[in-house]
Amino acid sequence: MNSVVCIAQVPDTEARIKIADGRRIDESGLKFIVSPYDEFALEEAIRLKESKGGDVTVLSFGPDRVQQALRECLARGATKALHVKGETGNADSFGIARVLAAAIKTIPHDIVFFGKQGVGTDNSLVGPMVAELLGYPQVNVVTHLEVGEGKVTAHREIEAAEEVLEAATPVVVTAQKGLNEPRYASLKGIMAAKKIPIETKNVTDLGLQDSDIYNQRVTIVSLELPAEKSGGRKIEGGDPAVAAKEILKYIREEAKAL
């Protein structure tokens, strides 16, 4: 049972973000990590390999720094890695999906895993787009997965209920938090990962041209940080009834929330 796990490298969720030229993130000095939802996808693929055999190929499209993320995935238990070189900042979700779909066609696979969204853009578009481009069934926001002979049974949370879907392989699955608990890389895994070569390709190796990827249908008009929060207001005094009146007065007259 072979799996492909598509990963995105994103800014560390603990990092302080700066904006450059009003339309993009300033990457200077910024730490990058594997997108957290992709970690659930990777863990599920590794568990599938451990129970049923096969390979786990991690795939990413991006600049040279992406190799660090791929190497981390190999240390956790992936068996192969493919890096398609390119600048994702100049591509929209559809452009990225076209690259990944073309790359997936070159890799033996039964299941293609994604995180449900890439932290940062939070579009939740690339996985479903890849499924459409490949003509595969897709099950999204999965919290439990059972893999049988030629099919998967996927559980996903919906409002006040759980939905259970069955799909034939090959299939695209996007992972939600709760699907599993991602493992950390062991020292043995880190050392072994150093010996695994990362295959690299350019978009032209996949039969694509820059115009196929960077002809953006969606563009960022402006990007800005949220406004700084103002300081809180402290109400002095130990009488709860008096404090309650002051709070209500503030909500009505100053915050104008009532």
Image (cartoon, rainbow, N blue to C red):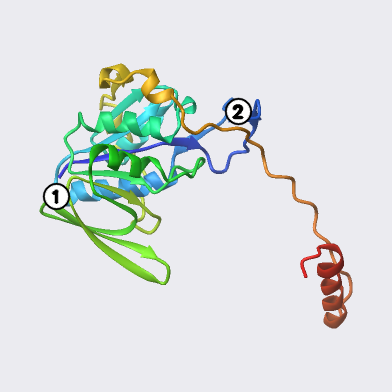
Label 1, label 2: how far apart the Cα atoms are: 43 Å
Q: List x then y, in percent, for residue 205.
A: 26, 18
Task: Tell me the tag on residue 26.
Answer: 2
Label 1 neighbour load within 10 Å: few <14, some 14-19, many 20+: few
**First in residue order: circle 1 vs circle 2:** 2
Q: Amino acid at mark 2?
A: Asp
In-image side of 57 versus 17 (left or right): left
Q: Is residue 37 left or right of residue 148?
A: right
Which of discs 1 and 2 lies nearer the camera? The answer is 2
Q: Is residue 26 above or below residue 76?
A: above
- Residue at disc 1, secondary structure: helix
Give how far across and how far down residue 224 sits, in percent. 66, 37
**Helix, strand or loop for disc 2:** loop
Write down the quadrant of residue 28 in the picture.
top right
Task: Judge whether 163 appears above or below 187 on screen.
Answer: below
Q: Look at label 1 and name its amino acid.
A: Lys
- Residue at the (33%, 24%) spot, across then down: 84
Q: Position of residue 62 (x, y in %)?
A: 41, 26
Q: Quadrant of residue 157?
A: bottom left
Label 1 belongs to which residue?
A: 52
Can you give x and y, in whole percent of width and height, for residue 116 in the image? 39, 49
The residue located at (25%, 27%) in the rendering is 196
